[in-house]
Amino acid sequence: QVQLVESGGGLVQAGNSLRLSCVHSGRTASRYGMGWFRQTPGKEREFVAAISWSSSRTYYADSVKGRFTISRDNDKNTVYLQMNSLKPEDTAVYYCARHRSSIPTTAPNDYDYWGQGTQVTVSS
């Protein structure tokens, strides 16, 4: 059974940093691309970043490019999202998700397992 558990969210002031973690279980967890999405009330889930199984490819939304970094440690079955220079508009629930293949895409429908989400709040 595949489970994804996020942690690391919280309340921070604008300009500060947070690092989110996502531990994913499953016998072949390291073979899949992984992604981070975020969602605010009344809006659709938004792609943030994704990483291929080998970490050779990373993808970012334009809104976070240059500020956020996605990485993974396959020995620990963990994916990270380092978020720097946070802005109030980054406030959202952040979700970790497992892609259906080793090379991820940006479409939420291409991901088959999701975590429960972790709240990130950035105050101005």
Image (tube, grey):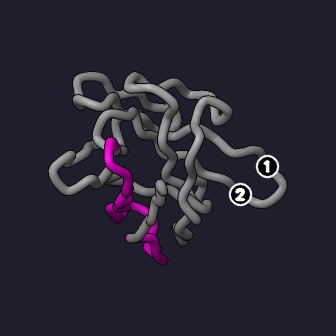
Q: Relative to the observer, which residue lies in front, 38 or 1?
A: 1
Residue 40's tag is 2
Q: Relative to the observer, which residue lies in front, 31 or 104?
A: 31
Q: Quadrant of residue 124?
A: bottom right
Using residue 28 as the reference point, say whether residue 88 is left or right of it.
Answer: right
| Most distant residue in the left direction | 75
Q: Looking at the picture, which amino acid does disc 2 mark?
A: Thr
| Most distant residue in the bottom direction | 11
* Mark 2: secondary structure: loop
Dot 2 crowding, Cα within 10 Å, few <14, some 14–19, many 20+: some
Q: Quadrant of residue 107?
A: top right
What span is in magenta? 8-28
Residue shown at the point (38%, 56%) measured from the top left: 24
Residue 43's tag is 1
Residue shown at the point (33%, 28%) measured from the top left: 52
Q: Would residue 124 be visible to someone looking at this image?
A: no
* Mark 1: secondary structure: loop
Is 119 colored magenta in this rendering?
Answer: no
Residue shown at the point (60%, 54%) measured from the top left: 89
Q: Looking at the picture, which amino acid does disc 1 mark?
A: Lys
Using residue 10 as the reference point, say whether residue 113 is left or right of it.
Answer: right
100 to 14, vertically: above or below: above
Residue shown at the point (48%, 57%) measured from the top left: 1
Q: Would residue 38 be visible to someone looking at this image?
A: yes
Is 19 colored magenta in this rendering?
Answer: yes
Using residue 101 as the reference point, say whether residue 28 is left or right of it.
Answer: left
